[in-house]
Amino acid sequence: MNTASSAVPLAVLKNSLAGRASVTAILMTLFLGLAWADANGLAGARPAWWLLPVAVVLAVGGTSEMVRLFSAHDVILSAWLLCPAVVAVVVSVVLGVQFSTSFPGPSSPAAMGWPLVVQIFVIGFIFIIEIVSYRAHTRAIERIGAAAIIVGVIGLPLAFMVGLRLLDIENIDATALKRGRLGIVPLLSLVAVVKAGDVAAYGVGSLCGRCRLVPTLSPGKTWEGAVASLSGAILVAWLVLEGLGIELPSRPWGGWLVFGIAVGLAGLLGDLAESLFKREMRAKDSGRSLGGLGGVLDLIDSLLFAAPVAWLLWTLGNA
């Protein structure tokens, strides 16, 4: 998300908007295509199987960028260790859903305990590595803390996104696609609400942003962009949950208004959290893998904080 001030020259702003728009269009097309395939069980695939590779790619990309940012701050981490660890946290939800189908009731809430268990094992393994290879004054505690941050900030939120896709599946097979299930709507509601906020924030903040939101941390973010972000999130929450007339067996707790406000605010917080991280690491973007959008972390920062909030609201509404 970006709420840049209008002090940016118009020509530069147009080029930036064009670059972002082209990359966004490509990513949106790919995501919607995979979401359609996943929602319809294309080729007999089980729920989440078409979208799980997306979560894995985001996990690897985001982890690699954070490792690189930490290394620039002289905290050297192993991407070869952390990337598989974060992926394990993400995919453990699917395994947890399959295991918990043997118990009555929706399986996704019970399955969310699996990523926490995997995270504990990962951190324990990292402690073992540092203990075995310990040398004085090598910043071992900083490496352990950085690794725990990466697993917790990237792995767990992505696991919640997978959990949203599998929210009320009691039997992870073709019967889960029958009418009356929530299906892919909870996941799409998260992505749509957060990204609507991102687009509104960048557009309004760039064109007419004047009042800086947190000038010391991120001078480009404005109150105008923040208000536009929250307004866009609320509008799209209404559209997805009510305006389109989608027949659903339940809604998020508090309805579309609470969902839009809570998820929209969480998305704003996620964006500011990444700004804090990049400011501390003295980096403008997390990477350049996505062209005008920056890196993977720049793409998913707002989703990372919003995913647990969306999952909680949908779970409470589906209880």
Image (cartoon, grey):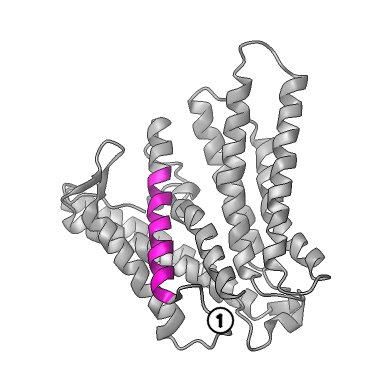
Pointer 1: what residue? 250
Q: How many marks?
A: 1
Q: x, y (%) of residue 268?
A: 37, 54
User: Is residue 241 rendered to the left or right of residue 96?
Assistant: left
**Whether residue 273 is situated above or below residue 19 in the rendered picture:** above
Magenta stretch encompasses residue 263? yes
Q: x, y (%) of residue 101?
A: 79, 70
Dot 1 surroundings within 10 Å: few (below 14), some, or many (20 or more)? some
Determine the residue located farthest toward the top in the rendered image.
136
For the question of whether residue 186 can be seen, the reply is yes
**Whether residue 21 is situated above or below residue 106 in the rendered picture:** above
Among the 4 quarters of the image, the one containing residue 133: top right
Front residue of 47 and 21: 47
State the residue at coordinates (66%, 10%). Answer: 136
Q: Amino acid at mark 1?
A: Ser
Q: What segment is highlighted magenta in the picture?
A: 256-273
**Whether residue 253 is situated above or below residue 75 in the rendered picture:** below
Q: x, y (%) of residue 183?
A: 62, 78
Q: Main secondary structure of the magenta part?
A: helix
Among the 4 quarters of the image, the one containing residue 229: bottom left
Q: x, y (%) of residue 231?
A: 30, 67
User: Is residue 177 rendered to the left or right of residue 235?
Assistant: right
Among the 4 quarters of the image, the one containing residue 14: bottom left
Magenta stretch encompasses residue 68? no
State the residue at coordinates (73%, 47%). Answer: 118
